[in-house]
Image: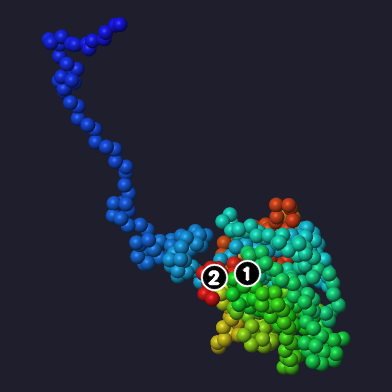
Amino acid sequence: RPCYLPLSLPATAPSLQSQTMARPSLPTPPPVKEPQTVAAKSGTTVDALPVDSLRNILRRLSLADLLRAALACHRWRRVAARCIPRTAPLLGYFFHPTATGLPAPLHSQSKEIDTPAVFAPLDASSPNLSLDFAPGASRYVLHDCHQGLLLLEPFASLPKGTIPRFLVLDPATRRRVLLPPPPRDTVPDDHRWRRSRYYVGSALLSRAHPSKLCFEVVCFAIDGGRPRVWVASVDDGRCSWRAHPRTMELEVDFDPWLFEGRCVHAAGKIYWHICNSYRMLVLDPATLHLSYLLAPAVLSDHFCTYRVGETPEDGRLCLLAVGSRSRQLQLWVRAEARGSDNGWFLEREMLNMRVVWDAVPGLPNDLAHRIFSVWPSDMDAGRTGKVFIRTIGYGRYSLHLDTAKIEPLHTKHGKEYGHPIYAYFLAWPPAFLAPE
């Protein structure tokens, strides 16, 4: 049997251990340290910012970024609520696209609307709103836009004394409600006025809270030569009607057909123009009192075209008119003082209408044809300093009163912006920042 003996090294050979110990030792490299932020070194985070510092940061954000920051946490929401602007942001415009051409007669204004209402965003940062959440909206026509709501009336023609069903939409939250017409017993002696009643128009009166679909709609009709106001109150889908007595101090001594059915919200009140008239109808939303407001006498003497609106700078009540002789665009502001003309002052005269006529492509040089075919239809309710120009067969335009810049208003499908053009403001403040 083989015998295995341990291997012994020569006495003169150094051991492995001694060889290892004889080598020079290399320095051990220090461990790699991860980079640390200032917050990690100090042990603080963004939550340690004082309220004043956080408020100064949030105030420098754009409106869209400010609303996103408000959703971060409860603390940021409370601070952001103090930084939001007081005025509602303009998101864009709602209108009915129409084909360029001759408008329909005034007796059938709704027939010039051949497409449902669409939305044109103000810029790339604005949301692209749509009415596709309300399939029946294509059978209705825009009549008002106020506090983030749209008011629509049926497209189909109704008897002149019938108050229609109203469709109210909230495009931002995609909610809708269809209002029934007022019951016949809303007016105790309704049988006396039913045959002579002439329905004129409607408007959005108020809104309770942006998080709820609670609002009021007002409409008025002429009963026996006197205007009467109806109010529909809606609370989360439940609608109730009430009728006010006739306004006996006001007499409608002209054909009610001359009333424009669409209203204008300006300086806290609601206005209805009257065609070829020296006055307009005014509704005070606080008291629901109707009254007439006279235009400047110099305008009424020459049957000048004027439109009520708000000044872009401070929101004062104003009139945009075209001088019958000078053809200058004029801006009249409301001011009860000595030297006023029925309570109006001519603040400034702007560019001549000849500048507008020359900028419209294809418009003939005949003066009478130019006066008849091109006119200012409305002031921009978005208070951008622009005026909307309407034409007969030559397109739709916007005119900036300060820069005299004229821009065509047409959709990507080749249609023009219909009349009227409603500026859409977001219901303000947003629901998650509004107090209960």
Give the SS element for disc 1. Answer: loop
Rendered residue at 77%/60% (across/down) = 115
Task: Place residue 234 in its image quadrant.
Answer: bottom right
Q: Which residue is mark 2?
A: 429
Q: Which residue is mark 1?
A: 148
Whole-percent x, y for residue 8 in the image: 19, 11
Rendered residue at 65%/73% (across/down) = 213
Label for residue 428? none
Whole-percent x, y for residue 110 in the image: 80, 68
Task: Place residue 180 in its image quadrant.
Answer: bottom right
Rendered residue at 77%/64% (across/down) = 136
Which quadrant is the N terminus positioned in?
top left
Asked whether 194 or 289 is in front, the reply is 194
Give the SS element for disc 2. Answer: loop
Rendered residue at 39%/63% (across/down) = 54
Whole-percent x, y for residue 280 in the image: 70, 82
**In the rendered image, the vertical position of residue 37 relative to residue 434, given as above or below:** above
Whole-percent x, y for residue 146 in the image: 64, 72
Q: Is residue 384 left or right of residue 294?
A: left
Callout 2 crowding tier (Cα within 10 Å): few <14, some 14–19, many ≥20: some
Residue kind at label 2, given as amino acid type: Pro
Q: Are marks 1 and 2 in contact (CB under 8 Å)?
A: no
Which residue is most to the left?
A: 12
Number of marks in picture: 2
Asked whether 11 or 160 is in front, the reply is 11
Residue kind at label 1, given as amino acid type: Gly
Which quadrant is the C terminus positioned in?
bottom right
